[in-house]
Amino acid sequence: MKSVIIIGAGIGGLSAAIHLAVQGISVTVLEQSDAAGGKMREVRAEGFRWDTGPSVITMRPVLEELFAAGGRRLDDELALAPVEPLTRYFYEDGVVLDATRDRAAMAERIGRIDPADAHGYAAYLDHAEFLHRVTGPLFVYGPKPSLADLAKFNPLDALRIEPFSPLSKSIARRVRSPHVRQLLGRFATYVGTSPYLAPATLGVISHVELNEGVWYPRGGVYTIARALEGLARSAGADIRLNTDVQRIIVRDGRATGVLLAGGETLAADAVLANADAARVYNRLLPQEVAPAKRAQRLGLAPASCSGFMLLLGVVREHPQLAHHNIFFSRDYEREFADIFERDVPPAEPTVYVSISSKTDPEDAPPGCENWYVLVNAPPLGVAFDWRAQARAYRDVVLDQLERFGIDLAPHIVVERMVTPLDIEAGSRSWRGALYGELFDSPWVAFRRPGSRAGDIKGLYLAGGTVHPGGGVPMVMLSGKLAANAILADLG
């Protein structure tokens, strides 16, 4: 029986474990923490429960396919409910907009802001659906593309996807209201980039949310990780928690196993690293065999954003809020310039607030709410000291909410703060970046590592820092693609 070691029980690692184990491969998953799920975690305290990683679930068919691969029906394992409104958007001029996948209702709501944009919004979502249909097979659902694959595009389609136009300009060509432009531009943050840097092709992200909808699993997003762990174990995978991998063993140019932190070695026919790609090349591989050029490029490449989070137990209910809420900053360009040019957290941030107790009342005591607050932040660097300045920045975030009429501070009874330092320590992501290399040009899709490490035979990669990218469904696909590569190579 062929054997595979998977480093990391994140969503990509669990996806790969399921696809491999059902094919009769002996799978051992090694997870350094005390729970599976990677960045998908949960925290409980004093009657409150928070999801601390992903909070927006899209692309339901990807989840259905993964459970089917393990011989189960998604609906038998998870109660995945549609969320409406998708998100409630708040603007400082008093405008409040509930996003919905109902195109007619959304056109009517946007028409109240700017009548011309009702048509422009519909035109943009038609374009986003076109992007998904044309680019999805190459850039999402299949193996990592090469430049030669561009020849597969119809020349007219290649022009329509606007490969060299920034996302912000693609949006501006179709809608004129600053409110609608800001709404559509925020989807760049789903892969940790800026709408002013991201290629227009990332408009495909708006399609999977605004056209296809948002889902929430009853019991919390972490139930996905729990269900996948159970599915992998039932398929035969051996998942070992609290097991830290110190080094990938490489002999004669081939990965042959791993060295654990306690000194034990485990051998395998292949190794799959469900870990940050930069960490794999700069920390897990022996430096005498790690390809210096790739290790250096991954270590020095501009990094995607990190995040600053507050987990708040609030003794008060806010009927004006929905499950997902966005409080927009007044100057979006300045906000992203702070993050990616000045390398500091935004002076006036856009604030995302998820209150899952709106959907799952059990997540908070009666009369209370569980607030998951997230602000985009720069990857770790020298311009901002989170050890010294985190508490002050927490006040900046609460002050921003107060501008929208929400005086939260007197009602907080439980509080946890998560900075980029905590993200780096907990997930071992390079510089605390959530999605690896910054998606600031159309060429990143070709530079991003693929399923096969390439430089070292028998070594494979999965997770949000490799093809096809970040987000729960994409990471699931990365595990599937890595498993397919392993199965093909092992015969």
Image (cartoon, rainbow, N blue to C red):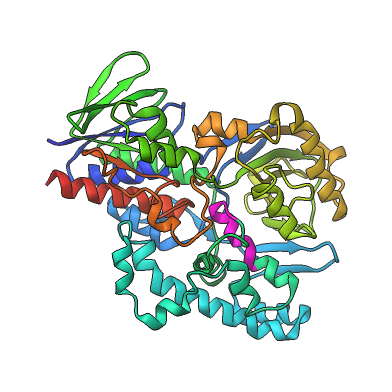
Q: Residue furthest top?
A: 263
Task: Out of 202 and 438, give the one closest to the viewer.
Answer: 438
Query: In this picture, which residue range is highlighted in magenta?
Result: 184-193
Instruction: Give the vertical position of 6 relative to 140 (above or below).
Output: above
Instruction: Give the vertical position of 258 relative to 336 (above or below).
Output: above
Residue 307 position in % (x across, y down): 63, 43
Residue 15 position in % (x across, y down): 35, 46
Residue 223 position in % (x across, y down): 49, 44
Instruction: Give the vertical position of 391 relative to 79 (above or below).
Output: above
Task: Specify whether residue 274 is in view.
Answer: no
Task: Out of 34 and 280, give the one closest to the viewer.
Answer: 280
Residue 186 drawn in magenta: yes
Q: Residue furthest front?
A: 293
User: Residue visible at 81% across and 50% down?
Assistant: 401
Q: In this figure, what is the number of numbered marks?
A: 0
Task: Out of 271 and 294, give the one closest to the viewer.
Answer: 294
Residue 109 position in % (x across, y down): 72, 78
User: Residue visible at 42% across and 23% down?
Assistant: 242
User: Residue visible at 53% across and 72% down?
Assistant: 211
Task: Out of 467 and 21, give the one closest to the viewer.
Answer: 467
Taking 347 as reference, is 247 left or right?
left
